[in-house]
Each structure stands twice: as C-alpha cells, then as structure tokens.
Image (cartoon, helix red, strand yellow):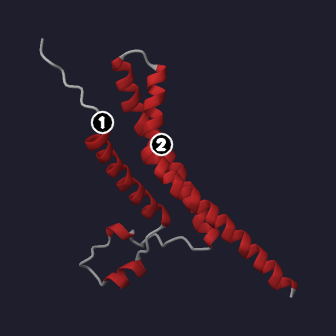
C-alpha cells in the first residue's frame, strides 16, 4: 500500500510540474511575440536620444531578444516533455509541419508526427500577435497626416 501512495505522490508531483511548465510555455510564447517587442521598444526609447539610435537599437535588440527568449522556451519545453514522461522523438521522426497532408491520412500523420505544446503555443501566440497588430493599426492608431506648407 505504501508503494502505491508513493507512486501517486510522485505522479501528482510530476503532473503538477508538467502543468506549471505548460503554463510557462503558453505565457512565455505570448510574451515572445507581444511582450518582448513592447519591452524592447520601451527600453530603446528610454536609452536612446536620437531617432537613428532608436531604430538601430530596436532592429538589433528586439529580434535577438526574441531568439534568446525562444531558445529558453524550447529548453523549458524539453523539461516539460521530460516531466510528462514522454520519450524523445526519434531522430528520423519528422516534425508535424514537415509531413505533407497529401502524403497520408490525417490520423496516421498525427500519430507519426504529433504536435508538441511549444509548436502549438508559438503558432497560436504568433497569430494572436498579428491579429492584435492589425486591430491596433486599423482601429486605434492615430494617423498623423503631414500637411504641405
């Protein structure tokens, strides 16, 4: 009986760890596409005095910060996969986005190349960021038209 209790506790701990890591992945994915650029623009505005300096700081810093934070998220994803107890995919296995939908039936394709949480979270957060950008641009951005003198 004590063995099953210990197994239940370790299973509960692994589930809680996996759930916490899943939340970190989903929130972190949204932060990559929304938070990092916003923070980069704000920080560049605070640290630079000229328009050119701002432009170079943003064009250099924001993509590098997004890549760095994305790399950290993929490290968290490997911890998440380990906490869930999944074995690593075989090196010959193909990612879900590389498998053509016309190659096989959908069910078989999904079984051979399942989508990981990081893939779904990054895709969903990137699409959400693009939609929010378009909504802001077309509905809330003020147009500053320059009138000729």
Instruction: Tell me what residue is drawn at x 41 percent, y 75 percent.
Output: 113
- Image quadrant where one finds the C terminus: top left
Q: Nearer the viewer, residue 35 or 8?
A: 35
Q: Give left or right: position of 134 versus 124.
A: left
Instruction: Tell me what residue is drawn at x 28 percent, y 32 percent.
Output: 142
**Residue 71 picture location, percent across and down:** 50, 49
Q: Nearer the viewer, residue 135 or 37?
A: 135
Q: Quadrant of residue 58?
A: top left
Dot label at residue 127 = none
Q: Counting other residues with Cα less than 10 Å from the Cα at mark 2, is it few (<14), some (14-19), or many (20 or more)?
A: some
Name of the residue lying farthest toward the bottom: 1
**Residue 49 picture location, percent across and down:** 42, 15
The alpha-carbon separation of the residues under discs 1 and 2 comes to 19 Å
Q: Which residue is mark 2?
A: 35
Q: Counting other residues with Cα less than 10 Å from the Cα at mark 1, is it few (<14), some (14-19), or many (20 or more)?
A: few
Q: Nearer the viewer, residue 110 or 136?
A: 136
Instruction: Tell me what residue is drawn at x 39 percent, y 68 percent.
Output: 95
Name of the residue lying farthest toward the top: 149
Q: Is residue 19 above or below residue 39?
A: below
Is residue 80 visible to us here? Answer: yes
Instruction: Tell me what residue is drawn at x 48 percent, y 21 percent.
Output: 47
Q: Which of label 1 and label 2 is nearer to you?
A: 1
Q: Quadrant of residue 37?
A: top left
Name of the residue lying farthest toward the left: 148
Q: Is residue 125 above or below residue 96?
A: above
Is residue 64 visible to us here? Answer: no
Q: Which residue is mark 1?
A: 141
Circle 2 — which element? helix
């Amino acid at each position: 009986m004590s063995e099953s209790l210990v197994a239940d506790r370790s299973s509960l701990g692994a589930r809680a760890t996996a759930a916490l890591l899943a939340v970190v992945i989903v929130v972190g994915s949204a932060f990559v596409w929304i938070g990092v650029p916003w923070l980069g623009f704000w920080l560049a505005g605070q640290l630079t005095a000229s328009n050119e300096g701002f432009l170079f700081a943003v064009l250099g810093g924001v993509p590098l910060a997004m890549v760095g934070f994305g790399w950290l998220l993929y490290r968290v994803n490997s911890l998440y996969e380990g906490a869930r107890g999944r074995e690593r995919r075989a090196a010959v296995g193909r990612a879900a986005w590389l498998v053509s939908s016309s190659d096989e039936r959908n069910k078989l394709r999904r079984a051979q190349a399942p989508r990981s949480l990081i893939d779904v979270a990054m895709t969903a957060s990137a699409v959400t960021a693009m939609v929010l950008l378009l909504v802001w641009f077309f509905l809330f951005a003020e147009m500053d038209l320059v009138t000729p003198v």
